C-alpha cells in the first residue's frame, strides 16, 4: 500500500504535465494560424506603403526590382495597374490571374463581402481561387498618381507553416514530456528511498532505545529479588534468625524470590522464542467455547479464594482454526491479568462473538480503567502501569507482550479498551 501511495503523486504530476501540453497544443493549433494571418496582413500593409513610395520615387527598373524582392523574400505577388485596368508593372509573369483577382476583389469590396480590413488607402480581402482551391489575402489600394496596386499572398503557405511548426513543437514537446515524466519518477523514487532510509534509521533508533530500556527494566526487576535473596541469605549465615520459625520465614522469602526470578526468566525465554519465529504452528480446528470453559474450571479455585465471580456468556459451540496451545496461552495471560486487576464488584465476564471471517473473544474485568496514554504501551515488554500493584501480584509486565507476540505470529488482532466499570481485553482469530 505504501508503494502505491509513493507512486500516486508522480503519476498525478505526469498527468498534469500531459494535460498542460495538450492544452498548449490545442491553443497553438487554434490560434497560431490566426496569429500568422495577422502577421501576413501587417506585412501586406507595410509592403503596400513601401511599394507606393517606390512608385513615387523610383524608375521602372527599380519598381520591378522591388516587386521581385517582395516575391522572393515574402512570397507576395505585386501588380501595378492604370486607371483603365491595364498592367503597368508586375513582379510575376502570370499577370492575367492576378488582374482578374484584382477585379474580383474590387467587385466584392463594394458589397463588403470577404473584406477583413479597410482604410482610406486600401482594403484587404480573403479570396479563394476555386480552380486551384487556394486561399489568398489580397490587398488593393491606390497610388498617388491614380494607379492601383494589388498585393497577394497565399494562405496555403501559412497553413503549411502552422503544420510544420505544430509538428516540430509536438515532437519537441513529446520528447520533453517523456524527459519530465522520467525526471519526476526518478526524483520521486529517490525521495521515496530517502523517506524509507529515514524511517529505517528512525526504527533502528527506536529499537536501540527499546533495547536499552528493556535492559534497564530487566536490571531493575532483578535487582529487588537478588537484593532480598542476598540479604536474607546473609542473615541466615550470620545467625540473625535464631529460632526455627524465623529461619523458615527467611528460607520462604529466598524461595519465593528465586521462584519469581525463575518465572521471569522463563517468560523472557518464552517471549524470545515466540518472537524469533522458529516455532512451528500446529493449526487445527477446535471449539473455542469449550477451551474457555475448561480454563474457567481451572481458575475456579483461584476465583473462589479471591472472591471473584467468573462466567462465560456463551455456551454454544464455536469452532475456529488456529494453534490451540498458543490460543490457550493467550487466554491464560488475559485471565491472569484480569484476576490481578479485578476490583469493585470483582466480576470477570468472557464472551465470544463470531463474525464472517473471524471470531472475537472478549475478557472483561471490573475495576479501574487504564490511563488512555498507557493503552498503547501495555503491550511493551516489562511495561507496567502501576509498578507497586504489579509486583504485589507477582507480575513483570511480560504477559501482554507474550499475547502480542503470539497473535502477531497467528496473524490475529488484539487490543484493550476502557469500559464504564472496567477494562475489556480482546483478540480475534480466523474461523478457518
Image: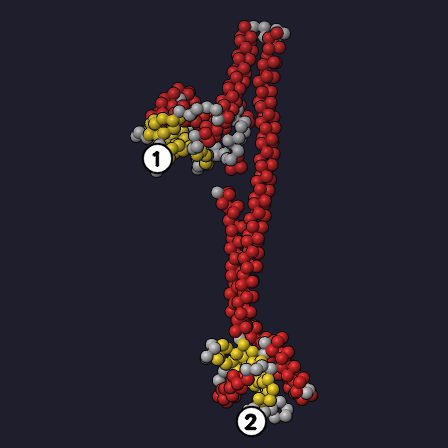
**Residue for point 56% across, 50% down:** 182
Q: Position of residue 366 (x, y in %)?
A: 43, 31
Tag 2, which secondary structure?
loop
Q: Is residue 315 left or right of residue 346?
A: left
Query: In the rendered image, is residue 63 in sight?
Result: yes
Q: Earlier in the sequence, mark 2 or mark 1?
A: 2
- State the residue position of label 2: 84
Q: Is residue 172 left or right of residue 357?
A: right
Q: Is residue 239 above or below residue 52?
A: above
- State the residue position of label 1: 354
| Residue closest to the eye, 129 or 277 | 129
| Mark 2 burial class by Cα count in 10 Å: few <14, some 14-19, many 20+ | few
| Mark 1 burial class by Cα count in 10 Å: few <14, some 14-19, many 20+ | some
**Residue for point 61% across, 13% down:** 231
| Residue closest to the eye, 133 or 182 | 133
Q: Residue furthest right?
A: 57
Q: How many marks?
A: 2
Amino acid at each position: 500500500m505504501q508503494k502505491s501511495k509513493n507512486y500516486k503523486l508522480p503519476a498525478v504530476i505526469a498527468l498534469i504535465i500531459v494535460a498542460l501540453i495538450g492544452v498548449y497544443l490545442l491553443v497553438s493549433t487554434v490560434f497560431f494560424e490566426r496569429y500568422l494571418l495577422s502577421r501576413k496582413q501587417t506585412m501586406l500593409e507595410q509592403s503596400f506603403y513601401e511599394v507606393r513610395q517606390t512608385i513615387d520615387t523610383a524608375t521602372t527598373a527599380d519598381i520591378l526590382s522591388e516587386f521581385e524582392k517582395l516575391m522572393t523574400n515574402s512570397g507576395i505577388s505585386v501588380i501595378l495597374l492604370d486607371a483603365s485596368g491595364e498592367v503597368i508593372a508586375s513582379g510575376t509573369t502570370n499577370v492575367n490571374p492576378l488582374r482578374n483577382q484584382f477585379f474580383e476583389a474590387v467587385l466584392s469590396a463594394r458589397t463588403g463581402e470577404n473584406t477583413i480590413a479597410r482604410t482610406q488607402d486600401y482594403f484587404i480581402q480573403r479570396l479563394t481561387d476555386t480552380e486551384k482551391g487556394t486561399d489568398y489575402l489580397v490587398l488593393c489600394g491606390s497610388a498617388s498618381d491614380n494607379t492601383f496596386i494589388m498585393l497577394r499572398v497565399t494562405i496555403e503557405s501559412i497553413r503549411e507553416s502552422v503544420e510544420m511548426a505544430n509538428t516540430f513543437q509536438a515532437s519537441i514537446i513529446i520528447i520533453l514530456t517523456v524527459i519530465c515524466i522520467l525526471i519526476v519518477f526518478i526524483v520521486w523514487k529517490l525521495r521515496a528511498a530517502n523517506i524509507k532510509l529515514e524511517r529505517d534509521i528512525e526504527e533502528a533508533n527506536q529499537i536501540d532505545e527499546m533495547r536499552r530500556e528493556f535492559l534497564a527494566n530487566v536490571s531493575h526487576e532483578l535487582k529487588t529479588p537478588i537484593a532480598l535473596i542476598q540479604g536474607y541469605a546473609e542473615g541466615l549465615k550470620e545467625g540473625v534468625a535464631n529460632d526455627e520459625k524465623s529461619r523458615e520465614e527467611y528460607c520462604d522469602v529466598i524461595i519465593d524470590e528465586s521462584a519469581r526470578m525463575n518465572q521471569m526468566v522463563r517468560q523472557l525465554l518464552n517471549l524470545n522464542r515466540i518472537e524469533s519465529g522458529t516455532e512451528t504452528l500446529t493449526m487445527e480446528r477446535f471449539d473455542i467455547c469449550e477451551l474457555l470453559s475448561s480454563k474457567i474450571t481451572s481458575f475456579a479455585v483461584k476465583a473462589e479464594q479471591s472472591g471473584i465471580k467468573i462466567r462465560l456468556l456463551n455456551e454454544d459451540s464455536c469452532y475456529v482454526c488456529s494453534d490451540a496451545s498458543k490460543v490457550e496461552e493467550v487466554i491464560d495471560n488475559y485471565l491472569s491479568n484480569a484476576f490481578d486487576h479485578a476490583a469493585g464488584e470483582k466480576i470477570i465476564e468472557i464472551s465470544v462473538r463470531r463474525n464472517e471471517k473471524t471470531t472475537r473473544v472478549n475478557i472483561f474485568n471490573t475495576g479501574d480503567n487504564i490511563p488512555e496514554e498507557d493503552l498503547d504501551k501495555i503491550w511493551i515488554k516489562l511495561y507496567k502501569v502501576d509498578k507497586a500493584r504489579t509486583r504485589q501480584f507477582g507480575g513483570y509486565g511480560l504477559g501482554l507482550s507474550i499475547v502480542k507476540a503470539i497473535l502477531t505470529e497467528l496473524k490475529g488482532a488484539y487490543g484493550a479498551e476502557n469500559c464504564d466499570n472496567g477494562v475489556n481485553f480482546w483478540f480475534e482469530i480466523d474461523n478457518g
